[in-house]
Amino acid sequence: MRRISSRDNSKIKNFIKLINNSKYRTREKMFVIEGRKMIREALECKNILLRLFIDESLVEDFQEEISLTDEDVDCCLLDKKLMNLLTDTEKTQGIAAVVQKPDYSFDSLLQNEELLVLLDRISDPGNLGTIIRTSWAFDVGGVLLTPGCVDPFSPKVVRSTMGGIFHMPVFENISLEDMGRLKKHGYNFTGTSMDTSQDYYSEELTGKKIIVIGNEARGISAEVRNVCQNFVKIPINYRVDSLNAAVACGIIIAEARKQKKGSSLS
Amino acid sequence: MRRISSRDNSKIKNFIKLINNSKYRTREKMFVIEGRKMIREALECKNILLRLFIDESLVEDFQEEISLTDEDVDCCLLDKKLMNLLTDTEKTQGIAAVVQKPDYSFDSLLQNEELLVLLDRISDPGNLGTIIRTSWAFDVGGVLLTPGCVDPFSPKVVRSTMGGIFHMPVFENISLEDMGRLKKHGYNFTGTSMDTSQDYYSEELTGKKIIVIGNEARGISAEVRNVCQNFVKIPINYRVDSLNAAVACGIIIAEARKQKKGSSLS
């Protein structure tokens, strides 16, 4: 383990750029995480943790995490002041890391027979992170994002996934052409909408199904709406405009998991 | 309408204090809102809007809102710079207001026969706001908060309710004694927990039921757990610790509304 003492160190600069710059994350195929829980989740995945930063005064507390890292992981010790530069939250937990972006195969997704979630221009980082976390909890096969979505590897999103970012396959920049390919491979697109009489719990949600959730303020775009083969609604009080996107998504995929478990028992 | 040109004006100072100071909000029985949607929701409730602030360059855009205010509402015009002081978001929409805190009767709640939600030490403003919004959507009768919860009238919570704060009765500082009174009046407390085999959808959720949701990190406290008469779980992938509190709450109260509508049809 080596000690870093200057904020001009290239590893510090690299980390801060990975916090703030989405294009840099994409180019470098890396993102950053912080806190014990996130580091633990990353350590469960093979070979994705590249560099570990630890508050030198807390080295004893993180012995277990350090012992779980591969030999080639670059472990760096920092003082509290430098450590604080590596967080965009108010308080650092004293541990942070650079990790590799996972690389999932869209082609193998086409062959699967699983529930997927397609998010159309979801813009709130907390919503996106929560949807990835919830999708993980309900055994969704993948979360697909249209180009207008917030970067799933931004620190706020990653934090809200509560580790889900390491376990839930996320596919960015899904085009209309990609949607066409999914359809050709038997996937059915089901949009969420208030303008339908079909309740989500009366709809068959098993098999090759893609649940489409639209932007927080504007809903599903016209082009993606055209891709949808049917629509379901969550019945709510007529005075209320809509549900929060992550809550709506959670309610529908909870129902899908219930249907799947029910049908696999029979 | 009068024009305010100084940031030392007592109405400006009062507004800023209402943004930042929870104790002041409690003492004055007032809170603040901003944006057209929130103002519209407030205008639907009788006599709660006390003072309106409008960006003088946007007065034409807000003619309808101005015409809907009662005669005794204090309408103030500000320039953009002053208007920007009245927001804790990055950009003001040019309209903000001081409103009266609603005053709901706990005694009449005891007599009702409705689903309630009890939140135990919920600390994230977005979660609390989303739960109030979702409770409104699913016709919950009231949201009860234990003393450790974040202030429901803080700007972040109010914003996340999307207007729900004006329509959903919220009761703060619910004590163990209050819970005892609710029980005596026939309410049944159902906690959410991962340590039970009872799935939420197999549980009867109609009638005088109180769904208990615990703190984001620590769950339901031991004292409140003691109050609960039964527990339900949302079945999820065993590798996932928990769901987001607002998502979990949404899934259960969506099920409760479904059961209620189903039983009222039969």
Image: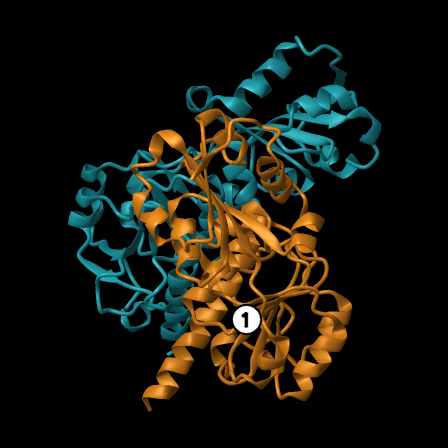
Chain colours: A cyan, B orange
Q: Where on the picture, by quarter, is residue B255?
A: bottom left
| Horizontal side, residue A232 vs residue A94: left or right | left
Q: Where on the picture, by quarter, is residue A82?
A: top right
- Residue drawn at point x = 44 percent, y = 56 percent: B42
Q: Is residue A77 visible?
A: yes
Q: Secondary structure at mark 1?
A: strand
Dividing the image into 4 quarters, which one contains the C terminus of chain B? bottom left
Q: Nearer the viewer, residue A169 or A83?
A: A83
A44 up-or-down from B214: above or below: above
| Horizontal side, residue B104 vs residue A178: left or right | right
Q: Where on the picture, by quarter, is residue B228?
A: bottom right
Q: Quick one: label 1, few (<14), some, or many (20+) residues within 10 Å?
A: many
Q: Nearer the viewer, residue A1 or A71?
A: A1
Q: Position of residue B187 (x, y in %)?
A: 61, 84
B232 up-or-down from A174: above or below: below
Q: Position of residue B198 (x, y in %)?
A: 57, 77
Amino acid on which disc 1 is placed: Gly
Q: Position of residue B34 (x, y in %)?
A: 46, 43
- Residue drawn at point x = 38 percent, y = 45 percent: B36
